[in-house]
Image (spheres, rainbow, N blue to C red):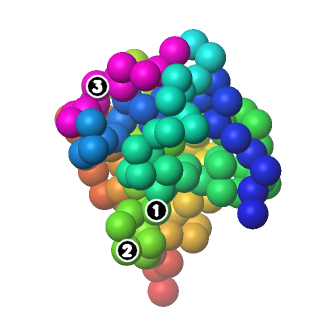
């Protein structure tokens, strides 16, 4: 089990809906503060169920902590592909390192990779070898 904790990183608290509280997608949770989640110990189950790749994999570099790079990577519901959520205030986060390196690594492992930035959505597939 991972020993990483969210700490002051709360970027997922903007991206995802929380059905238990009625918080819609794309709006900041009222419990967020500069120091982290104000109700972390009693947070709703949907928040407890969520874990980004940075939390799940201690080999993810510190510069890929979501609040630092503007990118949250998570599995889709079926765990057969990933969703890359980009902070709408940093729409170019995948265009430069470390985001571009992350995207390349994800495309080497997952097919497809879904990308979400605000209302914009796209699916990216790894390049196919020409034979």
- Sequence-earlier tag: 3 or 1: 3
Q: Percent position (x, y) of residue 117?
A: 32, 36
Q: Residue at x 41, y 52 (%)?
A: 45
Q: Is residue 54 left or right of residue 128?
A: right
Please tell me whether mark 2 sits on a helix, a strand or a loop: loop
Stretch in magenta: 22-33
Which residue sits at x=74%, y=45%?
A: 4
Q: Real-space Cα distance between discs 3 and 2?
A: 25 Å
| Most common secondary structure along the magenta stretch | loop
Judged from the image, the secondary structure of the residue bearing numbered disc 3 is loop
Query: What's the CA distance linking mark 1 and mark 2?
Result: 7 Å
Residue 119 appears in the rendering: yes
Query: Mark 1 touching mark 2, by CB under 8 A?
Result: yes
Q: Which residue bears the numbered disc 2?
A: 78
Determine whether 11 is above or below 116 in the image.
Answer: above
In 3D space, how far apart are the residues under numbered discs 3 and 1 (Cα atoms)? 21 Å
Q: Which residue is mark 1?
A: 75
């Amino acid at each position: 089990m991972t020993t990483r904790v969210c700490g002051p990183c709360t970027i997922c608290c903007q991206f995802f809906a929380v059905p238990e509280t009625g918080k819609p997608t794309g709006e900041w949770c009222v419990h967020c503060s500069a120091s982290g989640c104000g109700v972390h110990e009693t947070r709703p189950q949907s928040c407890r169920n969520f874990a980004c790749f940075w939390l799940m994999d201690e080999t993810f570099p510190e510069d890929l902590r979501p609040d630092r790079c503007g990118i949250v990577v998570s599995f889709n519901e079926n765990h057969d592909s990933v969703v890359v959520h980009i902070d709408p205030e940093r729409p170019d986060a995948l265009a430069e390192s470390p985001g571009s390196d992350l995207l390349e690594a994800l495309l080497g492992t997952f097919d497809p990779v879904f990308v979400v930035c605000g209302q914009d959505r796209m699916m990216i597939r790894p390049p196919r070898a020409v034979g």
